[in-house]
Image (cartoon, coloured by chain):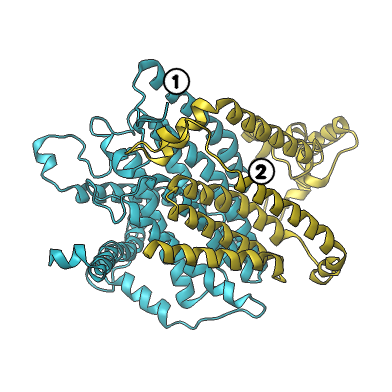
């Protein structure tokens, strides 16, 4: 068996497919239950019951929603750019899926444990803006177009501060590999020494995933539903899946960069019995809970306030913090070396 | 075998999309093909083992520069017919520029050589190409690197100077002023009789006088000719 999987080409391809399925199937089930979790948590915060009819505790609600969405009619608006209109949701969905290839769920336990893992994540998340921009343009509708433009400006702006926060973390790690980033937090999670950056990253992640209070691209009060007004049925469903998968992805990035990934909070006996992947899932769930909590709590930002926060507050602050981190590490001689050329 | 196949796929798509960039009728399609070309170029970097450059190409060019291209092209109101009229006129000039660039590339690549003494340490085992690149840029070529940074800084300042307008329009938001507003400036509780309107009390047909003092001039679409008088009359009406 091992001979087949590791030493023949067909076996290796089969292994790759199995690994992909092992990541994607739990992810998609997770997305389905994230929608339910969002409705339940928000209902609890607003003193309602939330979905409770389909299945025990409404557990089948997610599947009912999915079936409803699939059996709806696909409408392609007149004057829309047909090819691009259908391409946009596929792009959003597949980008949200491929990013998961590098997320480590245990020591060395990733589909692809590559040297530049964090850059790969940054690259994929920066591609995400195209799905939205193309959808907005191809719909041939002014609401969708405005939503697409808003979203493009927003995502590009917040990527800058995300990049700088990641640089500060990388300075302390000395490697671009996600596995090394987690292992560097064995003694103390980065959310302790870099607490302000943790907050900046989390808020930028909210903006990057177009979540409340930064959900201006959707802006239902002024833009109807933003870039996906014209979408229905499966195309809408793909956008929906992509957005929620991106939320989980961003939560896992927060967990890996600041909350110690698969590591338990303390390396002592009862905590180390729980396997690593479970710790990662706990942390992701915690981040997702905060995502939903924020949505239930804060009103939407005004657009100029959003831009001001990104460019005039987060960018200078994270730049200053990065220089401070570099200076501190240099002064104390803690700067990690990865054996550069001299 | 596998790497060769991947190389030929990336190259074919790259060349196809590069041709489509200049032949597509719709400028938005052109930009999208340009993005596809960037993406395939980064795939070629990956095949060559330069994973750091590949990711950087996607992050910088695809994720930031091309988004702004697309942004501008989508917002431009281009007349496609008019755009194609000038093709005959500009074709020779464009061909010349292309030819010169191609010749320069051929010249550069035919004499390509690694700086002596640099190649050996780069081939050290266990050295990732991120570390190798960082070592070269930040130790040996740090002045050139800083000079590039300065050029970019100048370009950035130039772009800001070109677009920054001092004109205070109604849309301009001044956060300090907005924070300086108090409840007394904006809100007044009135106890109205049944059937009486706010206007009967000389109410809020125009912004309150105190608002004019903290608001940006020109906002709200009305500028009192004499703010002092206006403030006085407003106060009288309120009283």
Camera-side residue of A275 and B215:
A275
**Frontmost residue, A258 versus B121:** B121
Task: Read off the residue under disc 1.
Answer: A327
Q: Nearer the viewer, residue B228 or A172?
A: A172
Q: Are marks 2 and 1 on the same chain?
A: no
Number of marks: 2
Q: Residue at x 82, y 72 (%)?
A: B81
| Residue B149 in sight | yes
**Secondary-structure class at tag 2:** loop
In the rendering, at what x and y percent does residue A260 appear?
28, 39
Give me the chain that's yellow.
B
* Residue A225 visible in this rendered orientation of the protein: no
The picture quadrant where one finds residue A341 is top left
**Picture coordinates of residue B29, whole percent (x, y):** 65, 67
Q: Is label 2 in contact with label 1 (beta carbons under 8 Å)?
A: no
* Above or below, comparing residue A221 to residue B130 in the picture: below
Q: Which residue is mark 2?
A: B190
Q: Chain of mark 2?
A: B
**Is A241 placed left or right of A317 in the picture?**
left
Side (left or right) of A179 relative to B65: left
Query: Disc 1 sits on a residue from what chain?
Result: A
Q: Quadrant of the N terminus of chain A?
A: bottom left
| A240 lies above or below A285 | below
Q: Which mark is residue A177?
A: none
Secondary structure of the residue carrying numbered label 1: helix
Q: Residue at x 47, y 29 (%)?
A: A322
């Amino acid at each position: 068996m091992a001979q087949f999987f590791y030493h023949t080409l067909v076996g290796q391809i089969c292994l790759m497919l199995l690994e992909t399925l092992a990541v994607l199937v739990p992810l998609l089930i997770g997305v389905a239950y994230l929608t339910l979790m969002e409705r339940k948590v928000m209902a609890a915060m607003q003193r309602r019951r939330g979905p409770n009819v389909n299945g025990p505790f409404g557990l089948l609600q997610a599947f009912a929603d999915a079936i409803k969405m699939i059996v709806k009619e696909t409408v392609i608006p007149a004057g829309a750019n047909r090819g691009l209109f259908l391409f946009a949701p596929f792009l959003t969905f597949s980008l949200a899926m491929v990013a998961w290839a590098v997320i480590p769920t245990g020591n060395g336990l990733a589909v692809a444990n590559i040297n530049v893992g964090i850059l790969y994540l940054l690259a994929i998340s920066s591609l995400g803006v195209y799905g939205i921009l193309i959808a907005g343009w191809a719909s041939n509708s002014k609401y969708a177009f405005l939503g697409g433009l808003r979203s493009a400006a927003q995502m590009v702006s917040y990527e800058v501060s995300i990049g700088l926060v990641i640089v500060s973390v990388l300075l302390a790690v000395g490697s671009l590999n996600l596995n090394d980033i987690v292992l560097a937090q064995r003694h103390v999670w980065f959310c302790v020494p870099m607490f302000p950056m943790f907050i900046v990253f989390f808020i930028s992640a909210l903006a990057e995933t177009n979540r409340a209070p930064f959900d201006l691209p959707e802006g239902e009060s002024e833009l109807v539903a933003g870039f996906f007004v014209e979408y229905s049925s499966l195309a809408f469903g793909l956008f929906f899946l992509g957005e929620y998968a991106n939320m989980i992805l961003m939560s896992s990035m927060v967990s890996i960069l600041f909350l110690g990934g698969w590591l338990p909070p303390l390396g002592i006996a009862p905590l180390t019995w729980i396997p690593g992947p479970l710790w990662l899932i706990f942390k992701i769930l915690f981040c997702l809970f905060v995502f939903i909590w924020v949505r239930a709590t804060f009103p939407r930002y005004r657009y100029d306030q959003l831009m001001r926060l990104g460019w005039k507050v987060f960018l200078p602050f994270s730049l200053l913090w990065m220089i401070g981190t570099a200076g501190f590490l240099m002064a104390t001689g803690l700067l990690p070396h990865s054996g550069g050329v001299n | 075998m596998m790497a060769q196949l991947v190389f030929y796929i990336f190259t074919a798509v790259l060349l196809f999309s590069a041709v489509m960039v200049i032949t597509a009728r719709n400028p938005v399609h052109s930009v999208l093909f340009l993005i596809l070309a960037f993406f395939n170029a980064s795939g070629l970097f990956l095949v060559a083992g330069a994973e750091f450059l590949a990711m950087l190409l996607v992050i910088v060019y695809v994720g930031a520069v091309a988004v702004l291209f697309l942004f501008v092209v989508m917002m431009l109101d281009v007349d496609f017919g008019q755009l194609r009229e000038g093709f005959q006129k500009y074709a020779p000039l464009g061909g010349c520029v292309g030819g010169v660039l191609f010749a320069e590339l051929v010249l550069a690549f035919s004499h390509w050589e690694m700086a002596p003494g640099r190649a050996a340490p780069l081939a050290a085992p266990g050295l990732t190409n991120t570390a190798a690149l960082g070592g070269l840029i930040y130790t040996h070529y740090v002045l050139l690197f800083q000079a590039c940074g300065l050029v970019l800084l100048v370009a950035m300042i130039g772009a800001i100077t070109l677009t920054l307008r001092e004109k205070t329009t109604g849309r301009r938001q001044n956060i300090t002023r907005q924070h300086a507003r108090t409840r007394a400036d904006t809100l007044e509780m009135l106890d109205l009789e049944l059937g009486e309107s706010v206007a009967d009390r000389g109410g809020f047909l125009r912004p309150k006088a105190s608002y004019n003092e903290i608001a940006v001039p020109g906002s709200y679409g009305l500028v009192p000719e004499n703010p002092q008088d206006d403030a006085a009359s407003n106060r009288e009406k309120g009283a």
